[in-house]
Amino acid sequence: MATSSPADTVLLKTPLHAAHAALGGRLVPFAGYEMPVQYPEGILAEHAWTRSHAGLFDVSHMGQAHLDGPDHATVAWALEALLPADILNLKPGQQRYSQFLTADGGIIDDLMVTRPADPAQDGRLLLVVNAACKAGDFAHLEANLPAGVRLVTHPGRALLALQGPEAAAVLARHCPQAPALGFMQAGPGDFGGVPVHLSRSGYTGEDGYEIAVDNADAPAVWATLSAEPEVKPIGLGARDSLRLEAGLCLYGHDIDTTTSPVEAALVWSIQKRRRLEGGFPGAARIQRELAEGPSRLRVGLALAGRAPAREGAEIVAGGAVVGIVTSGGFSPTLGAPIAMGYVPPALAAPGTALDIMVRGKPLAATVTPLPFVPTRYARKPGA
């Protein structure tokens, strides 16, 4: 997810806009699109349904594209010049999370990179970037790709996410290729005669899939999945509360051009080869922070009481402001307020007592490990 759009912007619509309106979705401006923030049952019900059954999300506003080159090594080297993940050693059908970085190691955007499973596409890498950043990301790629590697964008492709503990069973009824995928694996599929591209991934902390499909076929796929008894449509409101419980960053809030992957606790997304070799924008800063420690760290915060802390709330220790909340809200699963924010490393240990200023009053908070709610990704195919 990314930031909302100004009210006077001419809003785009996804291929599923009519379906959202017919379902009574409350449509709001978001990242240049008119998107459903919730449906009539409300955010809390949608959140709980996704945690216990299967939620269906329209994420067609995201930016889809691919890089083409003569072979995998060439296109991988081209992309590694812009981000810190190990793309060269991606296996066919494997997906990886990474970030585009500035020259000083700030995060331009975060994205998913997939190496196609089909050997005939060995010189191709699939990309999914954030909606509000996609124009800038694509321009950044165009300006920095070497000769022989080209960017192809996919405005004609929709993207659906089916998330929750019953998502795999539902999708298997329509797409026989789905069960063979494990977490962060991807490949082509046949959805009742409609060609799709599947990845076993998502942004809720639950098992699930993202389904890329041509715009013209998206309404039929949405309608088929919506008709399943385990499935309900889910809006952006519950998507945000689900990703917060999972401790996942929201670009423009928890991460931006002022934060490095090390500060953001995303070191796991920088594989050992890249940490050692560098060769990407901001490598000097990131290698220094890995060796010496960053000046601040993203942490989870559990608040006492029921009042949530929102983005921008000050984090206080010993009467002094030591950090800022970057995401916060009420956790429907835990029945308590939670937040994420940045604090000095000396205050980042789980169990550290802090205060968060809410409406001018300090509320007790405790640093807590992320994720707030345990993730339930399917680590093995067929799980």
Image (cartoon, rainbow, N blue to C red):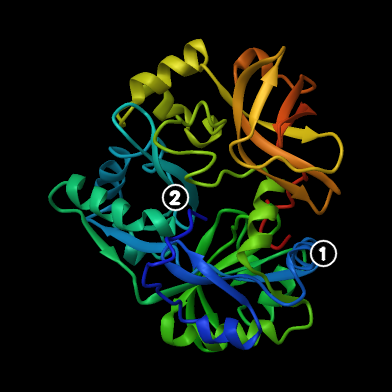
> Which residue reaches farthest left?
147
Task: Give the mark, 2 or 1, whose residue is nearer the N terminus.
Answer: 1
Q: What number of labels is visible?
A: 2
369 and 238: which one is in front?
Answer: 238
Q: Amino acid at mark 2?
A: Leu
In what element is the residue under mark 2?
A: strand
Give the residue pinned by disc 2. 111
Rendering quarter of residue 215: bottom left
Q: Amino acid at mark 1?
A: Ser
Return the x and y of residue 274 as percentages of the image width and height: 40, 29
Left or right of 99, for residue 147: left
142 and 326: which one is in front?
Answer: 326
Q: Is residue 143 placed above or below 154 in the rendered structure?
A: above
Please give the name of the residue rendered at 86% of the width and 49% of the height, measured from the top-left corner. Answer: 335
Alpha carbons under labels 2 and 1: distance apart:
27 Å
Q: Is residue 15 placed above or below 126 in the rendered structure?
A: below
Q: Is residue 251 placed above or below 342 in the rendered structure?
A: below
Graded by Cα atoms within 10 Å as few (under 14), some (14 to 19) or many (20 or more), the crowding at tag 1 reads some
Please give the name of the residue rendered at 30% of the width and 65% of the height, measured from the top-left corner. Answer: 153
Residue 167 seen in the figure: yes
Return the x and y of residue 182 as percentages of the image width and height: 62, 57
Give the residue pinned by disc 1. 52
